[in-house]
Amino acid sequence: MLKRLFPYAQKHRKYLMLACACVILETVFELVIPTLMADIIDIGVANSDKGYILWKGAQMIICALLALILGIMYARFAATAGQGFGAELRKDEFERVQNFSFANTDHFSTSSLITRLTSDVTILQTAISNGIRPLVRAPVMLLMALFFTFTINPELTMVFVVVTPILACGLFVIVRKVGPLYRLMQASIDQINTVVQENLNAIRVVKSYVREGYEEEKFKKMNIALRDNSEHAFRTSVWNMPLFQYVMYTTIICILFFGGQMIFEGVMKVGELTGFLSYVMQILNSLMMISAVFLMLTRSIASCERIIEVLDEVPDIHDPQNKDLIVNSGDITFHHVYFKYKTTAKEYVLSNIDMHIPAGSTIGILGGTGSAKTSLVQLIPRLYDVSEGEVLIDGHNVKEYSIEHLRDSVGMVLQKNVLFSGTIRENLLWGNEHATDEDIDWACHVASVDEFIHQFPKGYETDLGQGGVNVSGGQKQRLCIARALLKHPKVLILDDSTSAVDTATEANIREGLATLKETTKLIIAQRVSSIQHADQIIILDDGHINAIGTHDELLKNNSIYQDIYYSQMEGAGL
Ligand SMILES: Nc1ncnc2c1ncn2[C@@H]1O[C@H](COP(=O)(O)OP(=O)(O)OP(=O)(O)O)[C@@H](O)[C@H]1O
Ligand SMILES: [Mg+2]
């Protein structure tokens, strides 16, 4: 795991090394102080030598000041390294998520990805910023202090032979217990984020159904779960403290007891025992630091694993080696296509799809809810890859085109489409940043959205608000069509994209689309009127092609089409 994240630390090696150097020097200066103190007591005070005391006192102040300055410098370097490390990690995670296919994103929930990009990275970042100091300082301090205690009195130093294993065992038990608890805690944060995110995304639905109370209840449950999990984790890790204090005071009592006896026996001086005790405190402090670092690392490891899961998720849609192939005409063939969303699923969502769509033609796709219309068209721009069989464009498997070129050539207006915050122009240019003003006028005209835009005093510069809240459902759909048209795609897929548009405007859009002679158009619709003029209509039924034909042919021969057609005619009161 460390190996995986090592390259990120490597990039900030300079600051890490500087931070370590500062800590080592700081520790050395701090360690000299007790020796100076022992000298003051044993030599200065014993001989009543004021000059000596002042001289050693000045040395102590200088050492303390230097330690302070080094401590400040350390904090700066460590923060730079930690923040840099975090930024790199977030950048890579984000890039990886951008490369995810739809199938990859289905693995993680959106909110979990957000936690993994923010909270988990922050935990690692903090571990680096706050962890270097104790991690470097503690062993240096421990070794040096042990050396000093040993030089002062080797026998008394033996106390640590007993103390250290007790502490190590206690720490081991705590770390073993607390590790899984931290993982649970991060999972609870995921869940809270899910509730908040879903609630905010659907705030209008929540309000219109007056479900605020229910949502609050849902949030409360998750919040309590997070509280309980965190409490449990911290309650366990906090055992570290009493364990240490207990061992620390016992050690001090033992040393005072044995040390006191040695003073009575005349084998030890008072100053030596005072110095010895200072070092003992430092040893215990460094052991305490080591154990705190261990606990912090345990928490970081939980976050580390979650981050690595994102970094190691293999995008299951790859670019081909040869990227020069170009979509010329937009002729589409499905050859024995089978598809399911998860390899483990028992049943196929699409089965045995064989069809040919000539370039430039208009195809209507009709079928009940869940008949796999969306699933079918998603295979063309490789939003998902087929499970078996192949999808060909211009006679080449879609997998042979570079993903960027393929998706530029296949414009798709998704069923669940979104606009972004910003002006109408910004949103349209998002489809094609190089589009000229004429292009934009043309696309808006074809999508029948031009009149509506010109009603605004600011026209294209009108701000859409977050997620395009300022426009109606039908207007949003038409803006999304215009956005897709700006790419001048060879294949245009409209997945139920005019469902919220009135029939007159829909007819205008249809006329506009008919002028795109060079573009193959696939139109998914619920209304027969939306697709009855298509060159071919595909009837999907539970993932199978039930029939393909023109409106007249299907009306004559196909029972599903007849049912839909007549039920809609009745509905329209005809
Ligand atoms: N991301 C997904 N993961 C797993 N199963 C999915 C996913 N998306 C859709 N399905 C399943 O695939 C089947 C076909 O769904 P699809 O969205 O293609 O239907 P549809 O014909 O477009 O329906 P609608 O008219 O409601 O848009 C459904 O049974 C659905 O449950
Ligand atoms: Mg659909």
Image: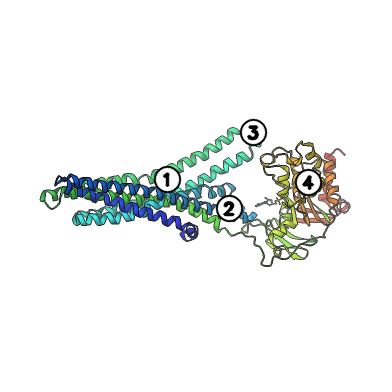
Q: According to the image, label 4 marks what residue?
A: 526
Q: Secondary structure at mark 3?
A: helix
* Circle nearer the viewer, 1 or 4: 1
Residue 454 visible:
yes
Q: According to the image, label 1 marks what residue?
A: 233
Mark 3–mark 2 CB contact (< 8 Å): no
Spatial separation of the CA atoms under disc 4 and disc 3: 28 Å
Give the color scheme: rainbow, by chain, secondary structure or one colour. Answer: rainbow
Spatial separation of the CA atoms under disc 3 and disc 2: 33 Å
Which one is earlier in the sequence, the residue at label 3 or at label 2? 2
Mark 1–mark 4 CB contact (< 8 Å): no
Of residues 485 and 392, the one drawn nearer to the viewer in this rendering: 485
Locate residue 63, reporting x and y percent.
30, 49
Above-or-below relation of 358 to 295: below
Q: According to the image, label 3 marks what residue?
A: 207
* Circle nearer the viewer, 3 or 2: 2
Occupied quadrant, residue 218: top right
Which one is earlier in the sequence, the residue at label 2 or at label 1? 2
Q: Secondary structure at mark 4?
A: loop
